[in-house]
Image: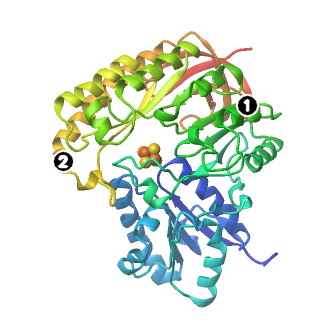
Amino acid sequence: MQGSKSKGLYLTTFGCQMNEKDSERIVGLLKGLNYRLTDSADKADLILINTCSVREKAEYKLYSTLGRYKRLKEQRGTIIGVGGCVAQQEGERLLQRIPYLDLVFGTHNIHKLPELVREIEEKRLRICKTEFYTELEPDESFAIDEGNKVKAYVSIMRGCDNFCSYCIVPYVRGREMSRRSDAILDEIRRLAEKGVKEVTLLGQNVNSYGKNLEGEISFPEFLRRIGTIDGIERIRFTTSHPKDLSDELIYTFLEVDKLCNHIHLPVQSGSNRILKAMKRRYTREDYLRKVEKLKKVVPGIAISTDCIVGFPGEREEDFEDTLSLLKEVEFDSIFSFKFSPRPMTEASKMGDQVPEEVKLRRLQVLQDLQKGITLKKNRALEGRVLKVLVEGKSKKDDRELTGRTECNRVVNFPAPEDLIGRIVEVRIEKAFANSLKGSIIG
Ligand code: SF4
């Protein structure tokens, strides 16, 4: 294969950072078959869509995206494949529904991709591979980094055991499995040698890291060890389940200087009745207590969250409870969604579904409220000097660079390109709802 002409891979990714990371692995694994990323589906020999089924909208997007590639199959014989959560959820049904689809590969089968693609190339088969395995794939297939050199995502675990009643993840990503910490630490050391300054540890529930691995270290201890790796200047992690946020982890923010002062802590609802129906296993009071402790122990910590509106049975007073929680916590940012019933989940079978127009209105009210809070919190940063890891050129203005503060704000500022990859001090001059503008110090 070496020396032969490379083939084009056109890859589309929907969904979360976990999927982005899986896509990096896909690109790295397919290099062995001489595939290189192309930015045009028209020129590709292989089109892959890495899907998300956490929300209904993402699933519809798959079908409309696939429709665009039918012509390419007919005209050029392009191989077309679907991976990720929808592939896992639908399996063979996808092959039946889309006659021009060649490959369906599930969330546990990414490492098998080179083998599967080769088989399709040689035998023109249609393949569906969606088995779940009780062991994780080999570490080499995780430790592939195709991202930029400044920051990298590192998968530390996969799957989830929590079975929140609205969530499809345990069904499409399987039960929780952690990778061995020594393999992950080696991976992070290699990333540091390549010039990576910031790592984000990924998992559905990172604070239960190591739970099913005998003799494994705790998540706080793992963070301490990453903190000793030369070259790594910033550590982030996502996502944390509030019920598993321990005092030890909160104090780790003080111990490990490199740990950024930001935490994503999904609350989902401010109503105890709804939290119970969601099977979140904490109350509004538990959540507020943890937030209070975080703010006390780590002054200035930025807290972001996820909220779902219109969960089955959500009444106006439940929604008001969510609004009041938002006002009380004053999150730095939120991701908010309308409830959408997902197959296999308990909530999809619940009665008392909230009408669409009510969900829409509640979502709007919630987002308007949060917009004001975010802007207020961003404005409070005006005049302050913040450390920014410079990630690259700004998309809106190529005379400007862009980066993130420790508290996870995007900052744009004019500066020379050779600062990319460095941590610089920036004075914040103007705050907007989604970003800050500043000027470099010195
Ligand atoms: S913790 Fe709940 S919401 Fe998060 S992935 Fe697991 S089941 Fe889904």
Other residues around mark 2 within 10 Å, as few (<14) / some (14–19) / many (≥20):
some
Residue 316 horizontal/vertical position (percent): 17, 31
Marks 2 and 1: CB-CB under 8 Å?
no
Q: Is mark 1 within 8 Å of ligand 1?
A: no
Outermost residue toward the bottom in this view: 123
Q: Name the residue tied to disc 1.
A: 224
| Figure check: 39 above or below 187 | below
Q: Amino acid at mark 1?
A: Arg
Residue 277 horizontal/vertical position (percent): 28, 41
Q: Name the residue tied to disc 2.
A: 353
Q: From the image, which quarter does the N terminus lie in?
A: bottom right
| Figure check: 391 above or below 181 | above
| Figure check: 439 above or below 84 | above
Q: Amino acid at mark 2?
A: Gln
Residue 348 horizontal/vertical position (percent): 27, 54
Other residues around mark 1 within 10 Å, as few (<14) / some (14–19) / many (≥20):
some
Secondary structure under badge 2?
Answer: loop
Location of residue 410 by image quarter: top right
Q: Nearer the viewer, residue 317 or 422?
A: 317
- The residues tagged by marks 2 and 1 sit, at their Cα atoms, a distance apart of 45 Å
Q: Which residue sits at x=19%, y=27%?
A: 317
Q: Nearer the viewer, residue 371 or 347?
A: 347
Task: Report if residue 406 is visible in the image.
Answer: no
Lower sequence index among marks 2 and 1: 1
Outermost residue toward the top in this view: 383
Query: In the drawing, does residue 423 fall left or right of residue 109?
Result: right
Q: Nearer the viewer, residue 362 or 341?
A: 341
Residue 99 horizontal/vertical position (percent): 40, 82
